[in-house]
Amino acid sequence: MTFNLKELIHQSTGKARSLHEKNVNPVFSRVLEMIGFAHEYTEGEGCYLTTTEGVRVFDALSGYGVFGMGRNHPVIRQAIQQALDLPLPNLVQMDVCLLSGMLAEKLIQCAPGDRLEHVFFTNSGTESIEGAIKFARASTGRRRILYSKGAFHGLTTGALALNGDESFREGFGDLIPGMVRTDLEDLDGIERELKKEDVAAVIFEPIRGKGVFYPEDDNVYPSIQKLCRQYGALLIADEIQSGMGRTGKMWACQHWDLAPDILVCAKALSGGLIPVGAILYSDAVYKKVFSRLDRCVVHSSTFGQNVIAMAAGLASLHVFQEEKLPERAAQRGEQLLAGLRRLQSKHELIRGVRGKGLMIGIEFGSPKSLLLKPAWAILHSAQNGLFAQAVVIQLYRNHRILTQVAGHHQEIVKLLPPLIITEEEVDAILAAFDAVLEECRKFPGPVWSVGRQLVSAAAKQTLFART
């Protein structure tokens, strides 16, 4: 019998939601229905997704930053096809793989600072974080790791122990010990911890994904790096979402001229068609981890160096450099940020706009208008973050723009559009935000109506959680 994937997809098109409700995650499916996102997509190309109804949606979410070069980039597809067509010796394990050596060389060449000399390949960002925890502990002989409040480094057990959002940790019991939550802007507090000389590393997202936060004072990160050097701790940069040109530089930590001891990346390195992750680390760390002949595979990953992933990574780096995507992100990001700040002066509900390149957060706050204050209060009596969710829903429903709320209980909408976005598409996003926020001047009005529906849904969820 011939296997025909195209025919199988054709036979099942339109059944995605029912299949997920039955076999995968019914609660997530219900949430998508509640917020109006319950569409089945049949195509993805460049900056756009297409639904079964033929509606084109601008993807300003990019799979949480995976599709930096857009969806189904032809160079990535071609590289994967070439790798499949070649009779390559994949996953021999007791060998050294040519493609992983080639990709490692390319990553080191474009790495920030002057310390990163080795690469370990993984299948995801969270797996890279797990490896970084092990490497930091092994290389320093210390147990504790400092991480930021509000941080998000992944959802496997080790990475979850570094998560600054309690909603992700709830219900999973005791996590690995030695992880210490701190305020990265409290330099005195960080120094007090480092002085104990039992801290293996300070891990940070140069720009926090949950909320698009980073220090206003440009001296904070360099000061933390200096303290780490002084007290023998490592500096770990989590560039899973902020790396690969997203912020207008190849790596976000380059905005502060940092030289981390360990850097983790994933997401956009893959080109979006097969998982690829990597840990870049110093020679000093390498010599402590892989310290003897009998420890040459003390850390490994079965599929980490598979030839399809390595081919995709090589092709992705080629596209980022050939198409100058970091530079394009800087240009379009400047245009988008400037336009959003103009909207801030026009719409009182915008409290702030921040970001670098095409990693942008729009934060909303309580209005001064006597007409709108009660509406805001109604939403916040139920749950913080419902206004931002109402904006997201209206952007999708009326303007066919897919965005996300930047984190649990945050009145922040995050934009992560593909780095190939055009000037005209930036203008369209700005016009859509302007139109949605103009609707907010009306009470009652469509945005507040959506908000009331979310209040009702939040109340039902609370009741469901208690029963």
Image (cartoon, helix red, strand yellow):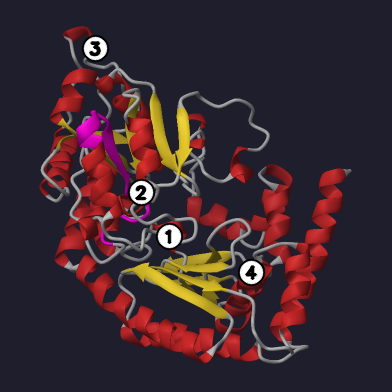
The amino acid at mark 3 is: Arg
User: Which element type, helix, strand or loop, lies under badge 4?
Assistant: helix
Can residue 57 be seen? Answer: no
Cα distance, mark 1 to mark 4?
19 Å
Provide the secondary structure element on which disc 1 rests: loop
Residue on which the image places disc 4: 389
Amino acid bearing label 2: Ile
Percent coordinates x, y for residue 245 in the rendering: 26, 61
* For marks 4 and 3 on the same chain, the one whose residue lies earlier in the sequence: 3
Give the tally of numbered discs: 4
Look at the image and tell me whether residue 436 can be seen.
yes
Q: Earlier in the sequence, mark 4 or mark 2?
A: 2
> Dot 3, how many residues are within 10 Å of its Cα: few (below 14), some (14-19), or many (20+)?
few
- Which residue is identified by label 1? 213
User: Which of the 4 image quarters holds residue 407?
Assistant: bottom right
* Location of residue 173 in the rendering, given as x and y in whole percent from the top left corner: 64, 27
User: What's the magenta region?
Assistant: 228-245
**Pointers 1 and 2 in contact (C-beta within 8 Å):** no
Q: Which residue is mark 2?
A: 240
Going by the numbered disc 1, the residue's amino acid type is Phe
Residue type at mark 4: give it.
Answer: Gln
Which residue sits at x=78%, y=88%? 444
From the image, state whether disc 1 or disc 3 is nearer to you: 1
Q: Secondary structure at mark 3?
A: helix
Name the mark nearer the viewer: 1 or 2. 1
Q: Are marks 2 and 3 in contact (CB under 8 Å)?
A: no
Quadrant in the picture for the C terminus: top right
Q: Position of residue 59 (x, y in %)?
A: 46, 70
Report the Cα–Cα distance between label 2 and label 3.
Answer: 27 Å
Q: Residues within 10 Å of mark 4 (few under 14, many from 20)?
A: many
Q: Residues within 10 Å of mark 1 (few under 14, many from 20)?
A: some
Residue, disc 3: 295
